[in-house]
Amino acid sequence: MKDNYKKIKFLIYFAEAVLLFVLQQNSFLVPEIFGGKPTLLIPLLISISMFQTEGVSTIFGMIIGILLDIGVGHIIGFYAILLPLIAYALSYISGRFLKINFLSYSIYCFIVVILLQLMHFVVFYLIHGYGGYSYVLIQHYLSRTIYTILLSPIIYLFNRSVEFRIREND
């Protein structure tokens, strides 16, 4: 019975990843604000990493990384390599050192989203020598970062309720 609840939980996480991917790719459902759309899959991965083991987090890191790479239209590999590493580290830290709560989730989101957006900007924009980098950084990356962080509590609260309801049934 316990394995069935785990399978249900993982199916819910997978369905949530696909749904959030569709939402963030569709400008009719989640509009752009100040030139940026949220990257909703990153907060999802953070919440999964907080509640799950390192192995499960790493697998979802790969799945979400591939979805993000497909969504941004760049070479598959940037997010597919970084997100499993981040997921493993967050899961390890959450399971051993920090209490799992909204404050720790918010801190993780703030740090991870900012770091990933800055790394993406450097790798795909700055290194290529494109002009107007301050405009792009402020108009697209900053708005995307703020938008993502502002919407992240919804994802945490949903996944927290899924985790605790299924945990009660275990």
Image (cartoon, rainbow, N blue to C red):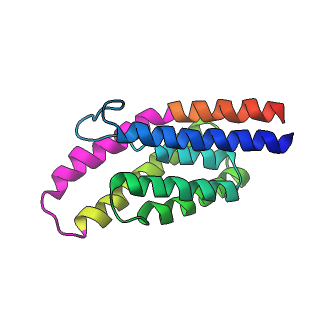
Residue 12 drawn at (x, y percent): 63, 38
Q: Is residue 50 left or right of residue 155?
A: right
Q: Quadrant of the C terminus?
A: top right
In which quadrant is the N terminus drawn?
Answer: top right
- Give the residue drawn at x 20%, y 52%: 136
Determine the image quadrant of residue 92: bottom right
Judge left or right: residue 161 versus residue 114: right
Of residues 75 and 104, the one nearer the viewer is 75
Magenta-span inclusion, residue 150: yes
In the visual, does 56 lie left or right of 61?
right
User: Residue 21: where, in percent of width, then height?
Assistant: 45, 43
Q: Residue at x 70, y 36 (%)?
A: 163
Find the magenta span and give its range: 127-153
Residue 100 in sight here: no
Q: What residue sits 36% from the left and 61% below the top?
A: 119
Above-or-below relation of 2 to 117: above
